Image (cartoon, rainbow, N blue to C red):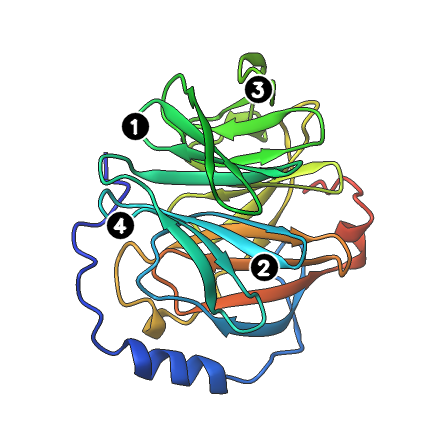
Amino acid sequence: MIPKKPVDLSSGRGLLAILVLVLLWPAHSYSQSTGNADSFRIVQSYPHDPRAFTEGLVYADGVLYESTGIKGHSTLRVIDPKTGIITRHIDVPDTYFGEGITAWQNQLIQLTWQDHIGFVYDRGSLRLLQTFHITGEGWGLTQDGRSLIMSDGTPTLHFLDPHTFRETRRLQVTENGTPVQKVNELEYIHGEIFANIWFSDRIIRISPQTGKVLGWLDLSTLLPASERTDSNAVLNGIAYDAKTNHLFLTGKLWPRIFEIELTPSVKSGKAYRK
């Protein structure tokens, strides 16, 4: 299996130059779609720390919360989405590899990769409130208002009680009858589960009732290959702003966060079938 994470994030050369270029990068206002993919419009792009190994992204109360990975580099961050500035952060202990994150009421819940542990923080202060056990690997995390939904890199999604963290049900993700592997970062939008596929530029839309893939977004043109300076710089990070109906998207080691608008067919939550 290809390692999920890179080895060295110590070099910060060129960071200032990259951030300056990002700040000057113009907004795009055109629709993109490929084949049977759902179309979208890029509204704007914002700076993103290109050293951040993004594992989870969530939007709540006007800010982005980001979980980054790599042992010794894992963090929980609060980001101003319009500037990319990290306004607060805490370091995850060096023994842990940070993974997916979601907001639940006044809390933030963060997974770890292979350490079988999750963290619960106070959303206002980022104070650690408790830890909980994870069965298997932790990859992506979201919530539907009733349950936490966790991915583990397999086609199986795990629904957890948000208070006890006990598993209440499982869901197998399939596309045209075939199980979908490497399901990663998650976001619950319009009654569907949006999911990054690791090492893919696709975000799929999953029915939480059947597990079937209802549609997908082709995001291969979002960040040019020339700006992906590392083989691990893959799409990963989905956050949804319900007020604007926009998504914030980024990737591991990406220098930008993109704000996009979905097409009306996706906004309405209608199932999309190929």
Badge 2 amino acid: Phe
177 to the left or right of 98: right
CB atoms of marks 2 and 3 within 8 Å:
no
Q: Secondary structure at mark 4?
A: loop
What is the number of the mark on residue 73? 4
Do the numbered discs 2 and 1 sit on residues whose CB atoms are within 8 Å? no
Q: Quadrant of residue 173?
A: top right
| Kind of element beneath mark 3 | strand
- Say which amino acid is labelled 3: Leu
- Residue ID for mark 1: 114
Q: In which quadrant of the rendered image does the N terminus lie?
A: top left
Examine the rendered structure and indicate whether residue 267 appears above or below residue 51: above
Q: Is residue 69 left or right of residue 214?
A: left
Mark-to-mark CA distance, 2 and 1: 27 Å
Q: Which mark is residue 160?
A: 3
Label 4, label 1: how many angstroms apart (C-alpha)? 15 Å
